[in-house]
Image (cartoon, helix red, strand yellow):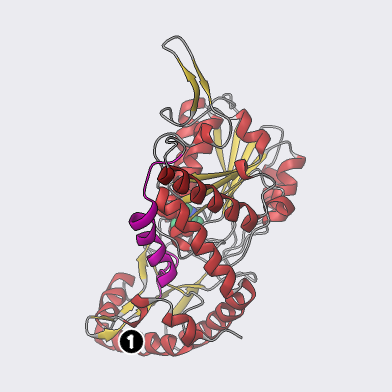
Amino acid sequence: MLDVNKIRADFPILSQKVNGKALVYFDNGATSQKPQVVIDAISKYYQEINANIHRGVHTLSQLATDAYEISRGKLQNHINAKFPHEVLFTSGTTHGINLVANGFASILKPGDEILVSAMEHHSNIVPWQMLCEKTGAILRVIPMNLNGELIMSEYDKLLSDKTKIVTVNHISNALGTVNPIKYMIDKAHEAGAAILIDGAQAVPHLKPDVQELNCDFYVFSGHKICGPTGVGILYGKEAWLNKLPPYQGGGEMIKEVTFEKTTYAELPHKFEAGTPNIAGGIVLGTAVDYMNQVGFDNIQQQELELLEYGTKRLLEIEGLKIFGTAAAKTSVISFNIEGIHPYDIGTIIDKLGIAVRTGHHCAQPIMDFFKIPGTIRASFAFYNTTEEIDVMVEAIKKAKVMLS
Ligand SMILES: *Cc1c(COP(=O)(O)O)cnc(C)c1O
């Protein structure tokens, strides 16, 4: 069992007061808080080894390069990629998806199809729409049911030899649904299509095994797994990364440049143009070490308890409706209270120190599907407690009285 009080002591921000009240941080779906080891590792990098990587022969440059590549290896192990060069550093999930979508511009022809799901984050919709505009490919949507579960029989029907890539999130940020991605990956491959998994909401809760999943691409952000902002990972199968053209041109991504012709560097450098977020890349390794030390079994156990307890307590509130009631669900609860705008609840409970997200959660099509303007979203992390849920429930009851 997780000693939550001990874990909470690792996160300095959690003992802060906000608006004079003890902070209750339930916006983990937007970004996680950072443990002291991660905060320390950032300043240690700048205090001791700051230098540009892969360029200089001088000692600091070597140290920074080594630390960056060691971190890449940690991420490789973490997701069980076959090779370190299949693990690309990006600025985050959004960057990773855009990189792949841009690469597919050289593959797609008019009339080819891209499948997205009905529950995607905007960053897994818009890059594909832009790709369709560029290539004449067609975007098709895998529908979901009222529980917020993708309908697999419809997915099977949508797949055809026209399908070139399927893109779906592992876990929905707005609903918490865990999608049957293994099934979806196998089916995509049977149809001869590639598949990208947006793992941004999955990696905070589980350790993906990309070889076992057999996905072609898997993307996530560092800042949702206790790491800094501005760094993330794009895993791609070697064969795909060799096939796709570079995303950005610049330093570091070349073998040889003349004004007549440039040849590109080997993987992973081909996709890592320019000076990256070096500190971020190194510290992402520290963050992953920290999460593994806590242990994903412990994380899941704690979060399941929070999900069950939170669901039960919230449903005690009259007129409260939960959106996202899938059988397979992670610790995200999206809800509304009849007759009250989500924003008003969010504003009042913020005054009581409680951080939740209100709005469409970068997933407007989901809100349109349920015919609502948005929801209040409480997303729990392993460092949250059932006592904090009690505080939120009381605050919502108070806000409800004030607003009705
Ligand atoms: C957060 C999130 C993204 C976008 O991540 P960025 O860090 O903003 O690039 C994409 N998809 C899902 C499911 C997310 O939760």
Q: Quadrant of the C terminus?
A: bottom left
Lateral position of residue 98 relative to residue 210, left or right: left
Hey, which residue is sitting farthest left in the picture?
A: 19
The residue wearing badge 1 is 395
Lateral position of residue 154 relative to residue 285, left or right: right
Part of the protein shown in magenta: 26-53
Residue 383 in the image, given as x and y percentages of width and height: 47, 79
Residue shown at 48%/51% (left/top)? 232
Query: Few, some or many C-alpha atoms within 10 Å of disc 1 (few <14, some 14-19, many ≥20)?
Result: some
Q: Quadrant of the N terminus?
A: bottom right
Q: Cβ(mark 1) to ligand 1 < 8 Å?
A: no
Residue 30 is one of the magenta-drawn residues: yes
Hey, which residue is sitting farthest right in the picture?
A: 190
The picture quadrant where one finds residue 354 is bottom left
Name the kind of residue labelled 1 in the image. Answer: Ala
Mark 1 element type = helix
Residue 51 is one of the magenta-drawn residues: yes
Residue shown at 41%/11% (left/top)? 259
Closer to the camera, 15 or 30?
15
Hey, which residue is sitting farthest top in the picture?
A: 260
Residue shown at 70%/46% (left/top)? 82
Residue 56 in the image, given as x and y percentages of width and height: 42, 36
Q: Is residue 138 visible?
A: yes
Residue 203 in the image, given as x and y percentages of width and height: 56, 61
Residue shown at 61%/71% (left/top)? 296
How many numbered marks appear?
Answer: 1
Up/down of 77 relative to 100, above or below = below
Residue 11 in the image, given as x and y percentages of width and height: 40, 76
Up/down of 160 relative to 135, above or below = below
